Image (cartoon, helix red, strand yellow):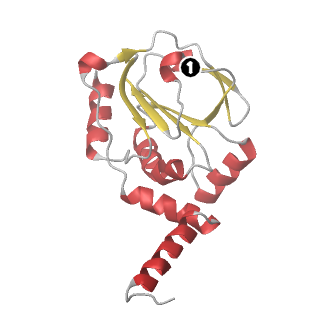
Amino acid sequence: MKLKKGKLSDAVWVLVILLLLFTPLGFHARVQLMRLFSFSPKVEKQESYQKITNYNWELININGEKVNLTSKKDNVLVINYWATWCPPCVAEMPSLVALYNDYGNKVKFVFLASDDKAKVETYLEKNRYKFPVFFELEKSPKILQAASLPTTYIIDKSGNVILKEIGAANWNSKPIRALLDSLVIE
């Protein structure tokens, strides 16, 4: 078999890419690649806002304490569905943590883990993250149901879903900070 010049190098690149994507090392490669291509989410147009009418949703925090979303009603909310095994979730987490660190005293954050508690605790400890993690005890209100990870919602004080983003995004961006600043003031 005779290869044309350049064909071997093409085959080697394909092999390298496949190894990076489908091996344990590939998880970290996918995370880094997703971070490179994560952009700031777009805000919904006001006429397309959906409104949460039922905040009754039982959650349990990582310490085992039950919490109902009704306790966060009338606040600006950021709700993020994520998992430790999800490369897009891991990719966007530093930007969400930065946002939480700056807005955690003005905005209520609900990080909903779709994962085993022990894995979440290990992940938080390894990355030195300190943010409020919750697990679902019952199905979320229909308007907040997420079929994909990650999915993030920003909800205003009146219950309007201002933003719904599916997939990795850069949450620590000027547009998102400006949005939260405007929602907190209202």
Q: Residue at x 43, y 56 (%)?
A: 34
Relative to residue 137, is residue 104 depicted above or below? Answer: below
In the image as oriented, which residue stretches furthest toward the front? 1
* Closer to us: 105 or 13: 13
- The kind of secondary structure element at disc 1 is helix
Residue 68 locus on image (x, y percent)? 61, 19
The local crowd at label 1, few if under 14, some if 14 to 19, many if 20 or more residues have their Cα within 10 Å, is some
41 relative to 26 in the view: left or right: left
Q: Residue at x 67, y 41 (%)?
A: 115
Residue matched to label 1: 69
Q: Residue at x 72, y 42 (%)?
A: 116
Relative to residue 18, is residue 76 depicted above or below? Answer: above
- The C terminus - image quarter: top left
In the image as oriented, which residue stretches furthest toward the top? 53
* Closer to us: 66 or 153: 153
For residue 69, which quarter of the picture? top right
**Amino acid on which the number 1 mark rests in the picture:** Leu
95 relative to 124 in the view: left or right: left
Relative to residue 85, is residue 149 depicted above or below? Answer: above
Residue 79 locus on image (x, y percent)? 49, 31
Relative to residue 141, is residue 171 depicted above or below? Answer: below
99 relative to 29 in the view: left or right: left
Q: Residue at x 31, y 47 (%)?
A: 173
For residue 37, which quarter of the picture? bottom left
* Closer to us: 170 or 31: 31
